[in-house]
Image (cartoon, rainbow, N blue to C red):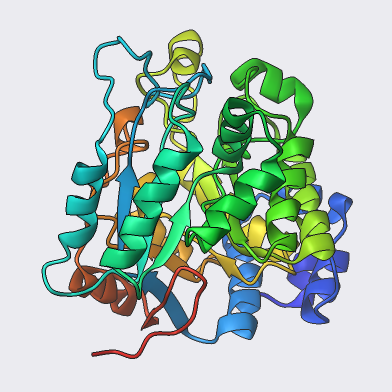
Amino acid sequence: MFDETYYQGLGLGGAYRKIMCAERLSEADGEALFACPDVTALGALAHHVRTRMHGNNAYYVRNRHINYSNICVNRCRFCAFRREADGDGAFMLSAEEILARVCDDQGVPFAEIHVVGGCHPELRLAWFEELFAEIRKARPHAELKAFTVTEIHNLACIEHCSTREVLLRLRQCGVDMLTGGGAEIFASEIRKCICPEKISGDEYLRISGEAHSLGIASNCTMMFGHVENFADRVRHLCALREQQDKSGGFVCFIPLPYQPLHNPLAAELPGLAGGVGAGLDRLRTIAVSRLMLDNIAHLKAYWIMLGIKCAQAALSFGADDLDGTIMEEHIGNMAGAGAGQALSRAELEDMIRRSGFTPVGRTARFATLRAD
């Protein structure tokens, strides 16, 4: 790794010393890290931290994504997935179709079932309760990860009840964890631009903390590479870190690069997120996120959104997880993510080994699974 003198020359001497002593970085440190011109120096620091936390392990999960519907009441300007109920490409899976997907594991059980969709204007909570009870019956050993906090809020509005009541009912029917999507960027002016109808950043954090207080873990996210700046990213990371100090339920942080195809924001700002530096910005953001989020154990290089090659590189820039087999994904792919929809367990393990790491199977909440 580069020595202290080198980091001093980059203006990162103070941050370097804090990192070596496992001390918390400040918001100013985060902005200085993002401003650093040498992305490999950032990667070396982040790799040091991820190795201190996880050794040479790199995690993956055999999972099944279910995008149950793309019909959504929100009109987020970055979204290529969302449709009106009567629009071209709108879909809604039946409970029978969802169960068929959950059961189609080719004889190797899924460790995680991941259910997420749009904020549907009419689907009642009881429908999901019945569905999740059936999923638990069909696959009792899989962990059930369902809904963003935005979907939790939408269900509370439909049912005219509190988000706490929604969470309690979901916990009772077997939901282990929330997915973590919907955070985007917390800065209010940015949200007004990219997702004006979505809940605020403060509400995202409040509902996440509420879930944690009920024993429901969650992931957390940040969408970057659109109209935000580095300072917005740092403040977002600090807000997640502060919430984790309070409630302690964030399992994994997932940086999500904006996908610049087939959405209104891309049409208005051509070339957004598609420049020659996009790959370096992704690695830079992963590295800084690992350095700032000292209290969130895991950082995911989500291969669907990053692409396979970038996700492999990210394992040396602070990430310790690649997500999983997925099997079927629509949200990223409809926005132009070109990595595909599925990888086999053998392919994931090969990706990890070729990157110089040891593959470790896991559950949704990062319990280690024995190799079979």
Q: Nearer the viewer, residue 180 or 25?
A: 180
Q: Is residue 194 left or right of residue 362?
A: right
Observer able to see residue 228: yes
| Residue occupying image coordinates x 63% and y 81% | 53
Q: Is residue 332 left or right of residue 12?
A: left
Q: Is residue 210 left or right of residue 344?
A: right
Quadrant that contains the C terminus: bottom left
Q: Position of residue 68 (x, y in %)?
A: 33, 38
Determine the image quadrant of residue 51: bottom right
| Residue occupying image coordinates x 26% and y 42% | 95
| Residue occupying image coordinates x 79% and y 43% | 235
Quadrant that contains the N terminus: bottom right
| Residue occupying image coordinates x 66% and y 76% | 49
Q: Position of residue 302 (x, y in %)?
A: 42, 55
Q: Position of residue 352 (x, y in %)?
A: 33, 74
Residue 149, placed above or below residue 347:
above
Observer able to see residue 10: no
Q: Position of residue 259 (x, y in %)?
A: 42, 32
Determine the image quadrant of residue 325: bottom left
For the image, the number of numbered tags is 0
Residue 68, placed above or below residue 177:
above
Q: Nearer the viewer, residue 36 or 342?
A: 342
Q: Is residue 164 left or right of residue 26?
A: left
Residue 20, placed above or below residue 104:
below
Q: Nearer the viewer, residue 53 or 284?
A: 53
